[in-house]
Amino acid sequence: MSTLNTLLNACQTEQVPLLAATRERVAQWDNWLQPLSGSSPAGEDPGYDDDFQQMREEVNKLSGADTELICRLAEKLLTTTAKDIRVVTYYCWAKLHREGEQGLAEGLELLAGLLERFGTQLHPQRDRSRKAALEWLAGSRMIDSLSLYPEVVRIDAMRTTGALLLIAQLTEDEPDEIRPELNALYGALESRLQKAGGVDAVVPQNASTSETLSAADHSDAPAIGRITSGQDLLAQARTLTEYLREQPDGWLSAHHLMKSLRHDTLRAIPAPDAQGRTRIEPPRADQRALLKRLYLQQNWAEMLDAADSTFSRGANHLWLDLQWYIHQALTKSGQETLADIIVADLKGLLTRLAGLETLAFSDGTPFADEVTLNWIKQSVLDTTGGWGNDTQSVPVTA
């Protein structure tokens, strides 16, 4: 339970209210939880059933699995043929693949309901097969699909954790040799939560890396409407900043809109290990190479655009080299007033989140390389007592 407790602590909640909420949602699956017959409440083992075989074939595909079909077959099997752990774990995976963590949470709540209502009657009934079926949830297929949805929504994270907590309680009295081991799933969920900035992050730290819409085509831009998550907020902010950049002298307002969401919502520095490394994924190599190339080419306008765009992606708002690149682009293009504003913004951030500039990404890439760190000390925080001593060397991370 230690890793599950770590996940629970990361959610900043207590077991009792979380379990109560989970049981309320489990009750919503009542139609799926009805016994199949009086003499055989869990039905017969579906191992040789055509629908089960078709479901398994879809799940085992390396790519292109029909997740909608898997969900339909799962409902049919669970409500007419058998109450089977394998079927519901496949359903969990398909729902995750289709809907993200919300789908995973729903599937896990269904699994918890089946375990609570049918217990050892669930198929497969052999101890080892039952253990393997439950542990499929913590296998590479599930973890890989979870990685497709790095952004965390608080309510979904709470639901997932609550369902896993109930499942753990329902299986905790089983002998050690047959009790399912789900630590890999707990660890993946906890790590994902930390990388996203915690359960209370207003804007996810690991924002989507998909490209923004072309400035020439706004027909598919998302309508500004009700915001239900930090990712929604960020997606709509990208639409607004794109519009602002197209206006006369609109760069600063666009830049500050995105910076306000990505920097001002940070409440604490990411937790580092003893070497100062965080769990945050580093900037992509192609992003680093592009900025370095544009600097060497002295293409200040394109470098400014590239740095701004990169800032809104992934966890690049923590990559302080971007602030150096933006400052250089503005200074070299004669926009000293805007460059001074960048310095003031960064000073405010580093004063509020002391030590941020000393941390590193998960692979050891520093948030601020040597060049950027010297610039921060000399011109941003002014720790050496002088201004205007900018080094002109390009940041060395590559």
Image: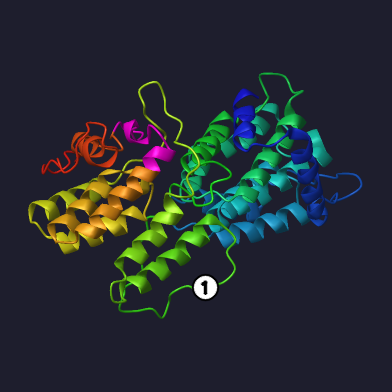
Query: Residue 267 in magenta?
Result: no
Query: Residue 317 or 181: which is nearer the viewer?
Result: 317
Outermost residue toward the front in this view: 385
Which quadrant is the C terminus positioned in? top left
Question: At 40% across and 34% down in the image, what residue appears?
Answer: 354
Q: Is residue 101 above or below residue 359?
A: below
Q: Is residue 211 above or below residue 13?
A: below
Label 1 Cα neighbours within 10 Å, binned few <14 / some 14-19 / many ≥20: few
Q: Is residue 211 visible?
A: no
Residue for badge 1: 224
Q: Which residues are magenta?
A: 349-364
Q: Position of residue 135 (x, y in %)?
A: 60, 33
Question: At 20% across and 33% down in the image, what residue appears?
Answer: 370
Query: Residue 58 or 280: which is nearer the viewer?
Result: 280
Query: Residue 66 or 335: which is nearer the viewer?
Result: 335
Q: How is the image coloured?
A: rainbow
Q: Position of residue 183 (x, y in %)?
A: 57, 29
Q: Is residue 377 visible?
A: yes
